Amino acid sequence: MNENFVLDASPIIVLGKADLLKKVSPLAKLWIIPEGVIREVEAKRPIESYFSEISYGSEVVRESVPTINPSIAAWDLGRGESEVLTLALEKAGTGVVLDDLQARKCAALFDISLIGSLGLILLAKRKGLLNLAKPEIERLKAAGLHIDPIMLTRILTRIGEDDKTE
């Protein structure tokens, strides 16, 4: 598992709205937030509150990306996603946290280690940071994260938190 992750705006916002940033913070040694992502987040809320939550158990750094990798630019993603993926390509062994489908496809094509907001919650449970994932997943959904209901049912069954096991 990666020790360093580059965060995109959507996971910061949705995990922040769901009050889960502190809970996932210890999953990384270092969280990297590109300046383009910071601008996207600050369009909704000042970044400082998110910084204090995600830095609860880890280091957080802001990083400037003056030039988008041309192979990433060809995907015509948003500035934030493009900066996230560019940094991951530049920093070997760094994973990305993305919820955007096109950006996830791009990460997969470039063999960039990838996880999303839901994946962070599942990882936090696996690492013993959460007793149950289901209540936190419900908080993510309430905060605006779309999760396919069939996929969610399969996940909850696999982790022993479906309605039949409660």
Image (spheres, rainbow, N blue to C red):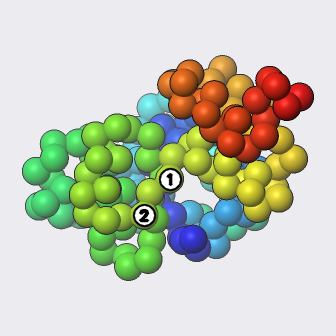
Quick one: SS at disc 2?
Answer: loop
> Which numbered disc covers residue 147?
none
Query: At which x and y percent is residue 154?
Result: 61, 33
Q: Is there CB contact under 8 Å for labels 2 and 1?
A: yes
Query: At which x and y percent is residue 123?
Result: 67, 55
Residue at the image position 67 percent from the left and 48 percent from the top: 122
User: Which residue position is annotated with label 1?
Assistant: 115
* Residue 16 visible from this viewpoint: no
Q: In the displayed structure, does residue 121 sit left or right of residue 1?
A: right
Between marks 2 and 1, how big is the CA–CA gap?
7 Å
The one nearer the camera, 35 or 30, is: 30
Q: Residue furthest bottom?
A: 92
Q: In the displayed structure, does residue 87 sit left or right of residue 162?
A: left
Q: In the displayed structure, does residue 67 sit left or right of residue 64?
A: left
The one nearer the camera, 64 or 142, is: 142
Residue at the image position 30 percent from the left and 74 percent from the top: 90
Report crowding for label 1: few under 14, some 14 to 19, many 20 or more residues within 10 A (C-alpha): some
The one nearer the camera, 120 or 154, is: 154
Where the C terminus falls, by quadrant? top right
Query: At which x and y percent is residue 92?
Result: 38, 79
> Which numbered disc covers residue 113?
2
Q: Quadrant of residue 109?
A: bottom left
- Number of residue marks: 2
The relative height of residue 15 versus residue 36 in the rendered view (above or below) is above
Instruction: Give amino acid for label 1.
Output: Ile
The relative height of residue 101 versus residue 68 in the rendered view (above or below) is above
Report crowding for label 2: few under 14, some 14 to 19, many 20 or more residues within 10 A (C-alpha): some
Residue at the image position 58 percent from the left and 48 percent from the top: 119
